[in-house]
Image (cartoon, rainbow, N blue to C red):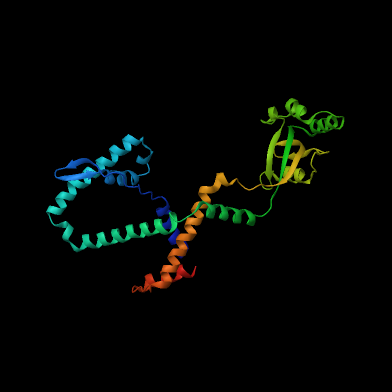
């Protein structure tokens, strides 16, 4: 069963992807019989193109959108001549579409357009402060096939040989040219034997006995330890903005629900709706 928040979030996802263009000078770009096609219609049609067509170059998008408008007006003219716009079914559909557009306009005015950059930054700071602290290590390793080879490398390190140079010379791993550098990693990223050994080392230390894993035998050195930094604001600000917009949208809906009584006459639908709202 979908919860109310999930149902609302599905509608929200549609809204976030809805980018209505600002209306420029409303010139006539084409005519279909005596019906004009204005620039404003073309802009709306371009914004509403199928995602696959939206990847086209700008001029091709305009042509695709114009073609769609012309097709619509050609058949719409015939529909009006037959009085299809006077039917109850058409009027019901138009009422729904009108209310859906009003819903979108209200959402844009009170949520999207009202959102300030400092509010997004404040939400980012709040989320960062709530993140659990996770330790990371920056490690290098030398991978060899046998335990004897690994012990010989450890003996060379004990004698003062440079770890990076030994990795370049003796490691069988693909990162040997980088001196066995594995960068920073948190727990859960490496095989258990390797991870346990790496996190047990102090900064600057290397393993005094070979570490066996499914890949062979490792000699590991820890270059640094740190608490994992949060992603930079610039990297995640769009995602944070969408989170704030989603929450504001749900707040707007919840406020509206307290102001207007909702009655559902179909028993099965009523139970399903109430269950979704409980969740």
| Any part of residue 1 in sight | no
Image coords of residue 150 (percent x, y)? 79, 33
Q: Is residue 131 above or below residue 62?
A: below
Q: Nearer the viewer, residue 272 or 20?
A: 20
Q: Residue furthest right?
A: 159
Q: Is residue 224 above or below residue 142?
A: below
Q: Is residue 267 left or right of residue 90?
A: right
Q: Nearer the viewer, residue 101 or 177?
A: 101
Q: Number of marks in the image?
A: 0
Q: Residue furthest left?
A: 81
| Any part of residue 249 in sight | yes
Image coords of residue 211 (percent x, y)? 77, 39
| Image quadrant assignment for residue 217 | top right
Residue occupying the point 32% across, 57% down: 101
Q: Nearer the viewer, residue 12 or 258?
A: 258
Residue occupying the point 15% across, 54% down: 80
Q: Is residue 273 above or below residue 41?
A: below
Q: Is residue 83 left or right of residue 45?
A: left
| Image quadrant assignment for residue 30 | top left
Image coords of residue 91 (percent x, y)? 22, 62
Residue occupying the point 80% across, 29% down: 162
Image coords of residue 10 (percent x, y)? 43, 57
Q: Is residue 58 above or below residue 102?
A: above
Q: Residue furthest top?
A: 169
């Amino acid at each position: 069963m979908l919860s109310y928040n999930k149902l609302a979030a599905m509608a929200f996802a549609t809204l976030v992807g809805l980018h209505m263009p600002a209306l420029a000078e409303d010139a006539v770009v084409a005519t279909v019989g005596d019906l004009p096609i204005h620039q404003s219609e073309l802009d709306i049609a371009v914004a509403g193109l199928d995602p696959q067509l939206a990847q086209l170059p700008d001029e091709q998008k305009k042509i695709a959108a114009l073609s769609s408008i012309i097709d619509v007006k050609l058949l719409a003219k015939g529909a009006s001549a037959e009085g299809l716009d006077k039917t109850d079914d058409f009027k019901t559909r138009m009422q729904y579409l009108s209310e859906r557009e009003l819903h979108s306009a209200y959402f844009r005015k009170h949520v999207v357009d009202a959102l300030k950059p400092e509010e997004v930054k404040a939400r980012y700071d709040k989320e960062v402060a709530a993140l659990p602290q996770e330790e990371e290590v920056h490690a290098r390793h030398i991978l060899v096939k046998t335990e004897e080879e690994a012990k010989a490398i450890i003996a060379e390190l004990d004698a003062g040989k440079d770890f990076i140079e030994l990795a370049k010379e003796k490691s069988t791993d693909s990162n040997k040219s980088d001196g066995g550098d594995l960068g920073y990693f948190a727990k859960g990223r490496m095989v258990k034997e390797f991870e346990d050994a790496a996190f047990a080392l102090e900064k600057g230390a290397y393993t005094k006995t070979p570490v066996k894993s499914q890949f062979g035998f490792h000699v590991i050195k820890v270059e640094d330890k740190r608490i994992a930094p949060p992603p930079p604001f610039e990297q995640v600000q769009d995602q944070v903005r969408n989170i704030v917009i989603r929450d504001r949208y749900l707040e707007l809906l919840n406020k509206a629900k307290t102001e207007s009584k909702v009655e559902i006459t179909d028993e099965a639908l009523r139970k399903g709706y109430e269950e979704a709202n409980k969740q």
